[in-house]
Image (cartoon, helix red, strand yellow):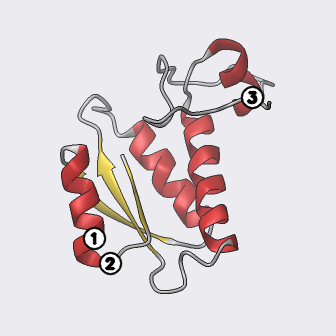
């Protein structure tokens, strides 16, 4: 069985504001469990690419982004937005909301996905 990056609740781990020089974001996460902005951008980008590959963005290219209040600087929210843009999709930021409200907003706007 392969290595898992996430569980049923998504990715979890301590937050680090910077990836050490010359480290790959995924390798660093697998070694330390630390989530960096670089890892979060790559994770979001990869997820969006999979959505596109399987045709799940054909009806809407919008990805709802809910902010986590623990990210007071917006570093990780901005990393998510960059990953979405890098994948050629359209981020739609809804600010700080509880996770269930972000999912409801995704349904109400007919977006393809949501991320918090």
Left or right: where 109 falls relative to 58: left
Residue under numbered circle 2: 110
Pick whichever, 90 or 100, lies toward us.
100
In the rendering, at what x and y percent does residue 89 appear? 53, 72
Residue at the bottom extreme of this rendering: 59
Q: Residue at x 62, y 36 (%)?
A: 39
In the rendering, at what x and y percent does residue 46 appear? 66, 54
Residue under numbered circle 3: 3
Looking at the image, is 76 positioned above or below residue 20? below
CA separation in Å, label 3 and label 2: 33 Å
Q: Residue at x 48, y 26 (%)?
A: 12
CA separation in Å, label 2 and label 1: 5 Å
Residue under numbered circle 1: 107
Looking at the image, is 24 positioned above or below residue 61? above
In the rendering, at what x and y percent does residue 63 appear? 42, 66
Secondary element type, mark 1: helix
Pick whichever, 12 or 87, lies toward us.
12
- Of label 1 and label 3, which has the lower sequence position? 3
Q: Which picture quadrant has residue 52?
A: bottom right
Secondary element type, mark 2: loop
Q: Which picture quadrant has residue 29?
A: top right
Q: Residue at x 70, y 21 (%)?
A: 30
- Of label 3 and label 2, which has the lower sequence position? 3
CA separation in Å, label 1 and label 3: 31 Å
Left or right: where 65 falls relative to 30: left
């Amino acid at each position: 069985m392969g290595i898992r990056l996430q569980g049923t609740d998504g990715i979890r781990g301590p937050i680090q504001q910077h990836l050490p020089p010359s480290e790959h974001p995924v390798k660093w996460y697998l070694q330390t469990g630390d989530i960096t902005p670089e890892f979060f951008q790559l994770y979001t980008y990869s997820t969006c690419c999979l959505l596109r590959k399987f045709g799940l963005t054909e009806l809407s290219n919008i990805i709802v982004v809910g902010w986590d209040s623990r990210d007071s600087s917006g570093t990780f929210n901005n990393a998510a937005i960059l990953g979405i843009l890098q994948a050629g999709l359209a981020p739609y930021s809804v600010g700080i909301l509880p996770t269930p409200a972000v999912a409801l907003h995704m349904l109400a706007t007919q977006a393809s996905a949501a991320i918090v």
